[in-house]
Image (cartoon, rainbow, N blue to C red):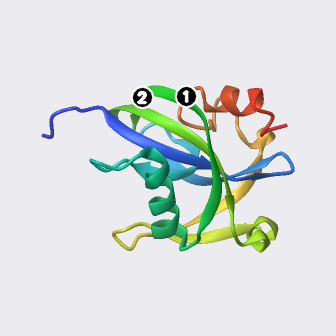
């Protein structure tokens, strides 16, 4: 078993007209859907903003600009029965290709080749049964007027 550790993570909020771009995950243990924005781990020696640029390029093959730090969250959670602890830098950002905001979803791929889709969701998509994660993100985005 791997020793528990705190993971440094950076996420980017892409938004338009009260909707944000999120990846949908299924927690099989809780039988719950969770939503999380695009992003990933911060590598040693890498600033969190650099991690966002790299992750979006790796996952969506898209260049971004106008990064702005919205805040930092600490998340202690259980997903698929496994405990997790993350310190999360949350950024606002924009795609260079403005046509992406008109697409219903975008195709992505993890570094291991696992394909996924991200889609635009408004605040009505996020409930106690289908939360936006990490914890505290919904309130941060509402406070920044990025969600209706």
Vertical arrangement, residue 68 with respect to residue 72, above or below: below
Vertical arrangement, residue 110 with respect to residue 90, above or below: below
Mark-to-mark CA distance, 2 and 1: 8 Å
Query: Is residue 101 toward the left or the right of residue 59 in the image?
Result: right
The circle on residue 135 is 1
Q: Give residue 139's position: percent from left, percent from top.
A: 69, 26
Q: Give residue 29's position: percent from left, percent from top.
A: 42, 39
Q: Residue at x 15, y 34 (%)?
A: 3
Q: Quadrant location of the N terminus? A: top left
Q: In which quarter of the image is residue 128?
A: top right
Q: Which residue is drawn at 35% across and 50% down?
A: 46
Q: Which residue is nearer to you in this view: 145 or 139?
A: 145
How many numbered dots are placed on residues in this image? 2
Q: Give residue 10's position: percent from left, percent from top.
A: 47, 44
Q: Can residue 81 be seen in this view?
A: no
Q: Which residue is nearer to you in this view: 50 or 108?
A: 50
Lower position in the chain sequence, tag 2 or tag 1 = 2
The circle on residue 77 is 2
Q: Which residue is drawn at 55% across and 28% down?
A: 135
Query: Is residue 123 toward the left or the right of residue 72 in the image?
Result: right
Q: Can residue 25 be seen in this view?
A: yes
Vertical arrangement, residue 123 with respect to residue 103, above or below: above
Circle 1 — which element?
loop
Circle 2 — which element?
strand
Q: Please report contact status of discs 2 and 1: CB closer than 8 Å, yes or no.
A: yes
Q: Residue at x 55, y 69 (%)?
A: 60
């Amino acid at each position: 078993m791997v020793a528990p550790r705190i993971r440094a993570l950076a996420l980017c909020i892409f938004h338009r007209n009260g909707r944000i771009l999120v990846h949908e995950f299924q927690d099989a243990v809780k039988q719950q859907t969770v939503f999380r924005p695009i992003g990933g781990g911060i590598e040693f020696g890498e600033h969190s903003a650099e991690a966002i640029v790299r992750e979006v390029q790796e996952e969506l093959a898209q260049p971004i600009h106008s990064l702005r730090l919205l805040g930092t969250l600490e998340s202690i959670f259980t997903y698929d029965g496994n405990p997790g602890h993350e310190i999360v830098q949350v950024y606002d950002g924009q795609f260079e290709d403005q046509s992406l905001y008109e697409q219903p979803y975008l195709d992505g791929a993890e570094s291991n080749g696992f394909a996924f889709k991200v889609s635009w969701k408004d605040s009505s998509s996020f409930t106690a049964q289908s939360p936006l994660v990490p914890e505290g993100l919904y309130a941060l985005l509402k406070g920044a007027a990025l969600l209706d």
